[in-house]
Amino acid sequence: MEIIKLNQSRIIEEQTSFIDLYNEATEDYEFWSKDFNMHFGYFIPFKTNPFKRDSMLNEMNNQVFKRLKINKKQLIVDLGCGMGGTMLYGLKNHKNLKTIGVTLSNFQVKEGNKRLKNYNGIIVKEDYTTTSFKSNSINGVYAIESLCHSGHDEKSLKEAYRILKPKGRFVIADAFLKKASNDLCVGGNYTYQQLCKGWDLKGLGNIHEVEKNMETIGFKNIKIEDISFKVAPSVLHVPFAITGFIVKKLLKKEKLKPQSLNNLKGSFYALLLGIQMQSFGYYIITAEK
């Protein structure tokens, strides 16, 4: 099957520290998910197994594609695709789908494309805030726990709007602040700062401000769903995954890489943030152009 070819003239140089984080620590994500789902999961009683992470992680993929409403030949873009775990899920479950993933990590481009070799998908090295896609050319766009690296800022939202075709759908699954960061309590602010430091995030967007920005940009039929309780069972896997990962390294007499250590710290603080539901929440946002 022919893979879509792109003009990659705008590929940027590696200048930010989070690129190093994902270049060096991505291989560690296989411990979190054998399917390389680099995100949290979506729990549905009697459908997903709360003791098997990938059952929930793949259900998050399913929920995102469900909201994209894939029902015919469509071109979908993943903004911040990681190793292409979600892309591969979509391609396996939607025969007429074509996907393009965007990442800044050389490692993810190289290894992710190996996994997509027999599918109609490709990962390219580009900045998701300034892609080389033509305006009004993409049927659907999604971002799972990736726009937080730019703070869910207006620039990344505008880019998604620009490349979408009229009536195209945009889906975001991510954690957000429920209040201004300067209104957080001392403990909440410390945990938040440590999360951003560990995962090298610009910050989490305020859900109310993000909604207003999307409206101003031109998005319509914006639907915001608080799915914090559905995500919680997968977040509870964090301490066990961290412990297991460290034990595995010790048994192999391997040292923890700085990037891996930062990633583990970020995961730990994500668990602590999840407890503070008055200030933080996990949402799925769906909108149309």
Image (cartoon, helix red, strand yellow):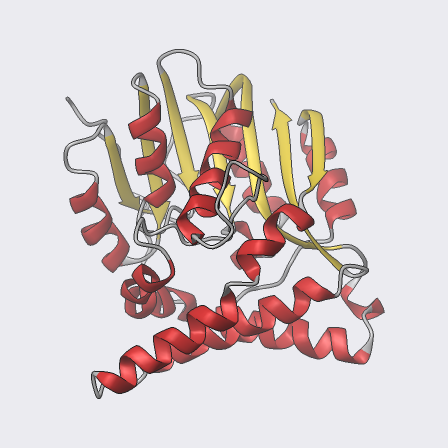
The image quadrant that residue 17 belongs to is: bottom left
Residue, x 47% and y 29% (percent of image)? 65
Q: Residue at x 65, y 71 (%)?
A: 272
Residue at the far front in the pictured view: 46
Residue drawn where x is 27% and y is 42% of the image: 123
* Image-based side of 80 in relation to 277, left or right: left
Res 140 seen here:
yes
- Residue 199 shown left or right of residue 279 in the figure: left
Query: Front-most of 119 and 159?
Result: 119
Residue 164 % position (x, y): 50, 25
Q: Which of 100 and 49 is in front in this view?
A: 49
Near-viewer residue (242 or 115): 242
Image quadrant containing the N terminus: top left
Q: What residue is at 62 percent from the left and 50 percent from the top? A: 153
User: Is the C terminus in the top left, top right, bottom left or bottom right quadrant?
Assistant: top right
Q: What is the tally of numbered marks visible in this picture? A: 0
Q: Which residue lies furthest to the top in this view?
A: 72
Considering only vertical position in the picture, is 152 above or below 218?
Answer: below
